[in-house]
Image (cartoon, helix red, strand yellow):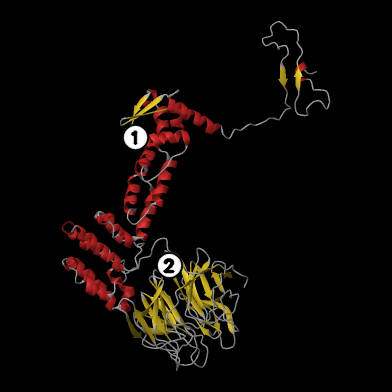
Amino acid sequence: MFPRWQRPPPRSEEFSSWSLLQRVKPVKEKSGDQSPAMEGAVQLLTRDGHSISHNSKRHYHDAFVCMNRMRQRGLLCDIVLHVGTKEIKGHKVVLASCSPYFHAMFTNEMSESRQTHVTLHDIDPQALEQLVQYAYTAEIVVGEGNVQTLLPAASLLQLNGVRDACCKFLLSQLDPSNCLGIRGFADTHSCSDLLKSAHKYVLQHFVEVSKTEEFMLLPLKQVLDLISSDSLNVPSEEEVYRAVLNWVKHDVDGRRQHVPRLMKCVRLPLLSRDFLMSSVDTELLVRHHSECKDLLIEALKYHLMPEQRGVLSNSRTRPRRCEGASTVLFAVGGGSLFAIHGDCEAYDTRTDRWHMVTSMSTRRARVGVAAIGNKLYAVGGSFHRYDGTSDLATVESYDPVTNTWQPEVSMGTRRSCLGVAVLHGLLYAAGGYDGASCLNSAERYDPLTGTWTSIAAMSTRRRYVRVATLDGNLYAVGGYDSSSHLATVEKYEPQINTWTPIANMLSRRSSAGVAVLEGMLYVAGGNDGTSCLNSVERYNPKANTWESVAPMNIRRSTHDLVAMDGWLYAVGGNDGSSSLNSIEKYNPRTNKWVAASCMFTRRSSVGVAVLELLNFPPPSSPTLSVSSTSL
């Protein structure tokens, strides 16, 4: 039934359940047999479907180590590479297996495929020797001494792993003194990722880069490309102007004719009036060209007609925004229990952490806070509770680069419980309380000229009012007029200096949070005269209508509301019984509020604004990481 060698073994514990060794007895050889069984042969039997897989993890390594030793001893080598005066022996199969360049050379119908000696050009001998060694060992050391020859050699041989390692090394070495050179090197060798990173580094560190010898040697086109970028990271446009003049003066005879083209890329309207008059108008290189005079006139017109800035806007009036910057939310001042705060803290969305920053010079609650460019402004407020003498006209600004507060020109009127907003680079302050009465007056501050100017008064006196900017207009929302809490809203049009009423809110609200998100004006919480609110509504300017949206999870008044990264953040405030350090944020896509990380400090009557910062937090600032709790 079975051939002798296939007969199943007898059932016995002496035999393995998986295989057996059976001595085959000699059989009589038949005529015509081509493969007679050998006497005493041993057969290894395996059940059908069962096998053993062996995988040596060291096989590839050991094999390549052996091949490299043979290469070094010249054994079985079938190719000699000649470059310069150097001869490098190798095995075609090894080189072709890891380099598409050698693969094409040795496997296609090229003459080199049949040769045992090949001469290479346009490659560094030492770099080639290192790369051949890499083909056998998969190891190479990249450093300052070889990266500039190794990268082009690796690119030629299409050894992308080594090429990437060179780019990674150069990226780690970026510095203001060499980033322009590395950017040019990356461009020459088509290293797109390194080129992008180096260019981004140049933009982010422009002030330091503009003072280097590499910058002074740049051709005109590259200078124009840099100073015309919206992503240039500069504390003020003065740095761009100085960089341009220094570049021209490095070779003044050869470059003076380029001044008009360069000045068109400098955003002169964003320079302060003092700087325009003292540094730009007096510069002979600028005065020599009529085109530059026209640019100076344009800048001065922008300064002298602030109400027309929306019409006068162009590429030279647009503030620069550094690429790679992230949004940071600042909570400024406020109060809790019987204390008025001068300290400030900031929330970094990337790390979900709060950081303490330098305190203001003056304690302020019921303060107006807004951001212009890369500075934060704290406007008015009060440093004491309800004594009628502590309401402030003073203003101070925070510079996140230096982590310091500086005094600014004071308002014409003392104001606490005011509303502030920024439009076309101008800071507006409206309504509030001066220690004696509710105000309907308003004024604006121009940081370019350092002056406050009165504008048309609102039709209604408003204390605990909030102001926001939407579609080139200001909106003063709700408030308290000394007798009732208001549902009224009025709109200010700067070009005609006029306030006009719009549709009333659905609820009366003072001390509400107001912000603009995706073309809609949101009003959250506040006080209606009987209780603290958690309801939220939004205004559609096209339809002139209000509609309710999801309420906050906590009742809040004297809080602040700000838009950031597509969300609305409601910060601090008072729930009717105590000051809050909690934060919640609203997602307009889901119409839901969720908790966010809490502040260090409980803050009612707080002011909040957002800056886009490249480097945050400031050095040595305390941090707090608080899990979002259920509200």
The percent position of residue 195, horizontal first and vertical second, equals: 37, 51
Is residue 211 left or right of 423 when viewed as pictured? left
The part of the image, by quadrant, that contains residue 360 is bottom left
The part of the image, by quadrant, that contains residue 446 is bottom left
Which is more foreground, mark 1 or mark 2?
A: 1
The percent position of residue 133, horizontal first and vertical second, equals: 43, 34
* Residue at the farthest top position: 31
Res. 99 visible in picture: no
The percent position of residue 290, horizontal first and vertical second, equals: 17, 67
Q: Residue at x 33, y 37 (%)?
A: 124
The percent position of residue 146, horizontal first and vertical second, equals: 36, 42
Give neighbour class at mark 2: few <14, some 14-19, many 20+ (Cα, 10 Å): many
Is residue 536 left or right of 52 when viewed as pictured? left
The residue under label 1 is 125
Would you place residue 3 above or below residue 401 in this image? above
The residue under label 2 is 612
Tag 2 or tag 1, which sits nearer the N-term?
A: 1
Give neighbour class at mark 1: few <14, some 14-19, many 20+ (Cα, 10 Å): many
What SS does tag 1 mark?
Answer: helix
Is residue 123 left or right of 56 when viewed as pictured? left
Q: Residue at x 61, y 70 (%)?
A: 629
- Amino acid type of the residue that numbered disc 2 sits on in the rendered structure: Glu
